[in-house]
Image (spheres, rainbow, N blue to C red):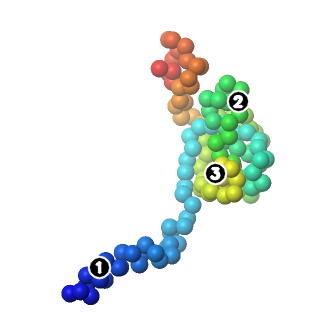
Amino acid sequence: MTTRRFLVSVLPLALLASPALHSDVQPPKVEITFGYLVQDTTCPKAQHALAAFCPYLDGIVLPQFYLDFAGNKNVDRWVGHNVRLRGTMEFTDCSLPLLRVTNIAESTGPLPPCPGLCQPGDPPPCP
């Protein structure tokens, strides 16, 4: 009986202390529905960044993620455009998360209301 209690209490701890399974170490897959693609070389692993939507409209480039495109894909036609991205997120020695982009397209989703940009009576997405 004592042996059984010992196993019941120690087994969960042993499982938690064991190395992660292969599926546990895969980077998370994400989709980002809007943001402005900008050139940014402050992270040596990326040539571009995704700038926050509302500050960009105010003329402020505020990067949220660094972007690495598979196979050094030429994405110059998307620079300065509101884009939708899919890929895997990694946390590296760069100051922001790195998104390894597998798909890029024009953003067609609803845009967030931006404080200060909406005037009374403006159409959606303004309140």
Foreground: disc 2 or disc 1: 1
Position of residue 111 relative to residue 68, above or below, is above
Q: Amino acid at mark 2?
A: Ile
Tell me if 14 is positioned left or right of 93 in this view.
Answer: left
Answer with the quarter of the image where residue 84 lies: top right
Q: CA distance from mark 3 to mark 2?
A: 20 Å
What label sits on residue 97 in the rendered view? 3
Q: Amino acid at mark 3?
A: Pro
Q: Residue at x 70, y 44 (%)?
A: 49
- Secondary structure of residue under mark 1: helix
Q: Which residue is mark 1?
A: 8
Labels 2 and 1 touching (C-beta < 8 A): no
Answer with the quarter of the image where residue 119 lies: top right
The earlier-in-sequence mark between 3 and 1 is 1
Residue 125 picture location, percent across and down = 51, 24
Q: Which residue is mark 2?
A: 60
**Residue 41 visible (yes or no):** yes
- Secondary structure of residue under mark 3: loop
- Secondary structure of residue under mark 2: loop
Position of residue 32 relative to residue 58, above or below, is below
Q: Kindly give the residue lying farthest to the left in the view shown.
A: 1
Q: Amino acid at mark 1?
A: Val
Tell me if 7 is positioned left or right of 47 in this view.
Answer: left
Q: CA distance from mark 3 to mark 1?
A: 39 Å
Q: 127 and 96: which one is in front? A: 96
Q: 43 and 13: which one is in front? A: 13
Answer with the quarter of the image where residue 37 lies: top right
Q: Kindly give the residue lying farthest to the front in the view shown.
A: 2
Residue 45 picture location, percent across and down = 74, 55
